[in-house]
Amino acid sequence: MIVKVKISDITIPQGLLPRVLTGTKPEVVERYAELYELGEELPPIKVWKRADGYWLIDGAHRLTALRQLNKEYVEVELVDCRDELDFRIKALQENLKHGLPLSVEEIKENARLLYKAGLRDVEEIAKILRRAQRTIYNYVSDLIEEERKTQAKKVLELREKGYTQQQIAKELGLDQATVSRILSLKDYAKLQSLQKYIFRKHPTTQEKRTNI
């Protein structure tokens, strides 16, 4: 849906848009400002309508140019987002369609930010960023390892408190087979050995369902 909104109601959410390292480029902003002054019609920017206003999904350079020209209103395309993670994904997808190419470091940082934001599917992150699964796994492998160590520690702590395997699984949102496997390792040295075995190659969808 295309609607006209006040530019002052649109927020560029810092740290949530794809260009996490380079930001907007002044030369691109200037080019768009010239086009607007010449009366050129550029594609509408895309926003997520929220209770507190609008969050920019795509079009940071165009929006910045309009602000420099002291424009009051702009036509926008409304995009539905379930939550902030969905917002981040859609912003990345829009940027990768037509935006200035992201640097390797920005691709890496976005992969890590998606994982930290709750997207644990390496295959899905690879599809979003248009990179190989192995590449994405290399970017987030330390996050996965740290999360699994923390998870194993919680399992062992609950076991020491007298929880049954079924109770531990329910408490931590794990399947009982995973809990049983962690408890059979006894110590972290064995846990690390298992992790190395599991990730001798990038995890498949089936492996991700059954791994720790």
Image (tube, helix red, strand yellow):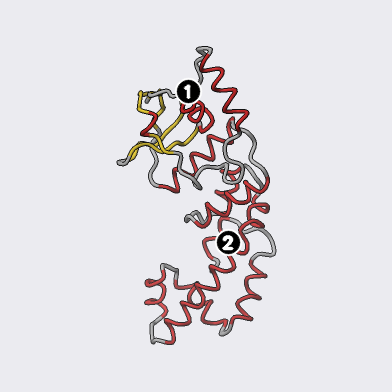
Front-most of residues 70 and 25: 70
Estimate how packed mark 2 is, as few (under 14), some (14 to 19) or many (20 or more) residues with alpha carbons within 10 Å. few
Q: In terms of sequence position, does the residue under pointer 1 or pointer 2 come before the other?
A: 1
Residue 162, x across and y down, in percent:
39, 87
Estimate how packed mark 1 is, as few (under 14), some (14 to 19) or many (20 or more) residues with alpha carbons within 10 Å. few
Residue 104, x across and y down, in percent:
68, 46
Q: Residue at x 60, y 51 (%)?
A: 109
Q: Residue at x 51, y 57 (%)?
A: 116
Name the residue carrying label 1. Answer: 69
**Is label 1 in a helix, a strand or a loop?**
loop
**Three-letter code, disc 2:** Glu
Front-most of residues 147 and 122: 147
Quadrant, the N terminus: top left
**Is label 2 in a helix, a strand or a loop?**
helix
Q: Is residue 169 above or below residue 161?
A: above
In which quarter of the view is residue 47 placed? Answer: top left
Question: Marks 1 and 2, Cα distance to the nearest angstrom?
Answer: 53 Å
Left or right of residue 207: residue 48: left
Q: Nearer the viewer, mark 1 or mark 2?
A: 1
Q: Residue at x 48, y 45 (%)?
A: 14
Residue 149, x across and y down, in percent:
55, 73
Front-most of residues 105 and 80: 105
Q: Which mark is residue 207?
A: 2
Front-most of residues 192 and 107: 107
Q: Is residue 116 above or below residue 68?
A: below
